[in-house]
Amino acid sequence: MIDINKLYRTRDGREVRIYAVDGGGYWPIHGAMQLSCSGWAPASWDNHGNACNSFHRDDLIEVRPRHKRTVWLNVYGRLDDVTAYNDKWKADQSVSPRIACVKVELDFAEGEGL
């Protein structure tokens, strides 16, 4: 279901503005999509974000916020023994003997991998 409080783009990457999600009928989602060269065009979608025209490129895709994190992984002797820390100094406080401390830069979309 389309939520008026979330951000969407078209399947081909154009910006979308959602004005209403209770329009009734088969195309209850009302808004506008950015055209490639000449501003905005009115558009309608069904409750699942499928465009009312036959062009699937106009279907709605939720834009999920991206997050970046730096973590430090303490790697210990056993293959399945790894611990993540937000700060290097916290990783250095580990009392177990580690064989490595690896800095990892994470860049992920919210909900990715769930």
Image (cartoon, rainbow, N blue to C red):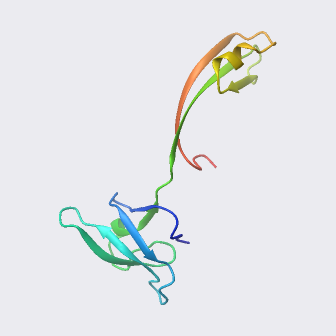
Residue drawn at (56%, 48%) of the image: 110
Q: Nearer the viewer, residue 108 or 11?
A: 108
Q: Position of residue 97 (x, y in %)?
A: 78, 9
Task: Using the image, determine if residue 106 lies above or below residue 10.
Answer: above
Q: Nearer the viewer, residue 13 or 79?
A: 13
Q: Position of residue 78 (x, y in %)?
A: 77, 17
In the image, 12: left or right of 39?
right
Q: Position of residue 59 (x, y in %)?
A: 40, 68
Which quadrant would residue 30 be assigned to in this image? bottom left
Counting every numbered tag in the picture gives 0
View extreme (left): residue: 37
View extreme (bottom): residue: 25
Q: Position of residue 79 (x, y in %)?
A: 73, 20
Q: Nearer the viewer, residue 93 or 2?
A: 93
Residue drawn at (34%, 72%) of the image: 32
Task: Using the image, determine if residue 71 lies above or below residue 98.
Answer: below
